[in-house]
Amino acid sequence: MLECGTHVLAGLLELEDGRALGRACSCGGTFQDKKRQSKTVRSLVGNTRIMHTHQQCTSCGTWRSPEDLVLDIVNTGFSPGLRRAMADTGGELCFEKAAGFLDKLGGVRVGAKDVERVAEAIGKDILARQEENILTVLDGQPPTSTQTPDTLYIAADGTGVPMRRKETQGRAGKHADGIARTREAKLGALFTQVTTDEKGNPVRQAHSTTYVGKIESVDTFGPRLLAEAVRRGFEQARRVGVLGDGAVWIWNLASEYFPTAIQIVDYCHSHEHLSGIGKLVFPYDEKARKTWQKPFSDLLWDGDIPALTMALREVPLEGKSKEFLTTTIEYFNTNRERMRYRFFREQGLFIGSGVVEAGCRSLIGERLKCSGMHWSVPGADAIIALRCCLESNGFENYWESRRPTTKAA
Ligand SMILES: [Zn+2]
């Protein structure tokens, strides 16, 4: 069957001679045929050879092959279909395993290094398209979103990715020797909500979550998140919520790029800070701690931060513990507007950033933090972008957008 497929494919490929492209160069010059050569194309149904033409522009000297362009095989001997399968499996599994699966399930023999190169090239292309989109947003010229969400949530978080030594040189880390082993990848998760359930709890719209992520500073991550938010209907949404833990960068980013959004600190994080104090008061007796903590928890759940901080000031702690208490009270005080949990609940808003934390674990952790893995920044960025695209159900659209002229196997 595969052999038959190969013959059919070879025939189809012959039809794609690139004449549809014309001969005009973007510089105004004309492309002229220079030589014709055969090229091996590896596809999901086997290998085949095609003839392709090398053309050069008479005025600017640029080279191109029209057949490669229409078949989407510029600078590669793998067909788009095979590259897509390699990216799909390489995005999900480590490159060794991905190559093994392609062989086992599809009878396709490719090396782990091939899978790595192809998956990373596609991830880089996804990033490059994202950058273009970011520029249109920063220029104030983005295409108007077709989405009109009722409530749009933008949740952000960071997670460490294990790096090769050269990527962390000169960076301070938490390790005993003071050298960093990881770099922080930032992840944004965007999702929408239209309704609440019978108990008044917000319901996340099915399949509405999309992700963007990269190892970068807030200065560039902010615009990345903004561009995705604009695409998701940020400007049309009735209301927008930004969800995060207490990390200061998230709130700086929110104030700069989403000034109209409601800022919400993840309730679980707030509660953890409270438990931290409980553990200092009752280090061993968990039952007593819970009983003691209950009235404080109730105040937090109600979002009554002035009452909570006033009550916490009376907690009898000394020395280091007292310092921790003071810091925690400051944390509650600083974030009091973002902890109006009763009000948020009455509005039917989410008060947890679990979606983005789960994303950090499944999208980044499960693929990039496996034992023995050490990434380069560009390599990690490419795979993160690829996985974000796959998880956001954007991969189909990506392939549609990159091959307007043909759909070869
Ligand atoms: Zn030219």
Image (spheres, rainbow, N blue to C red):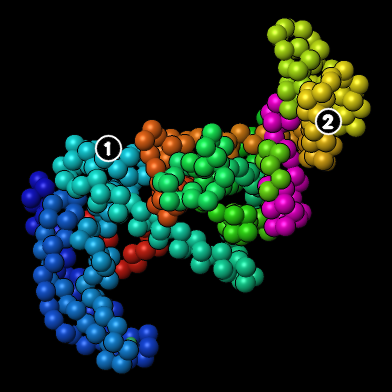
- Tell me whether the residue at label 2 lies in contact with that at label 1, contact meaning CB atoms closer than 8 angstroms: no
Q: Callout 1 environment at 10 Å: few (<14), some (14 to 19), or many (20+)?
A: some
Q: Is residue 234 magenta?
A: no
302 on left or right of 110:
right
Residue 70 pos. (x, y %): 27, 70
Residue 172 locus on image (x, y percent): 57, 45
| Magenta stretch: helix, strand or loop mostly | helix
Q: Hey, what amino acid is under mark 2?
A: Thr
Q: Which residue is mark 2?
A: 326
User: Bounds of the magenta span?
Assistant: 250-272
**Residue 401 appears in the rendering:** yes
The residue at the point 60 percent across, 42 percent down is 157
Reply above or below: 113 against 308.
below
Horizontal side of 308 relative to 60 (left or right) equals right
The residue that appears at 42% across and 55% down in the rendered structure is: 378
State the residue position of label 1. Answer: 97
Q: State the image quarter where residue 143 is shown.
A: bottom right
SS of the residue under disc 1: helix
Query: What is the crowding at mark 2: few (fewer than 14 residues within 10 Å), some, or many (at least 20)?
Result: some
Q: Residue at x 16, y 73 (%)?
A: 52
Query: In the visual, does 11 lie left or right of 281?
Result: left
Question: x and y percent of residue 409 in the render?
Answer: 22, 56
Q: Quadrant of ligand 1?
A: bottom left
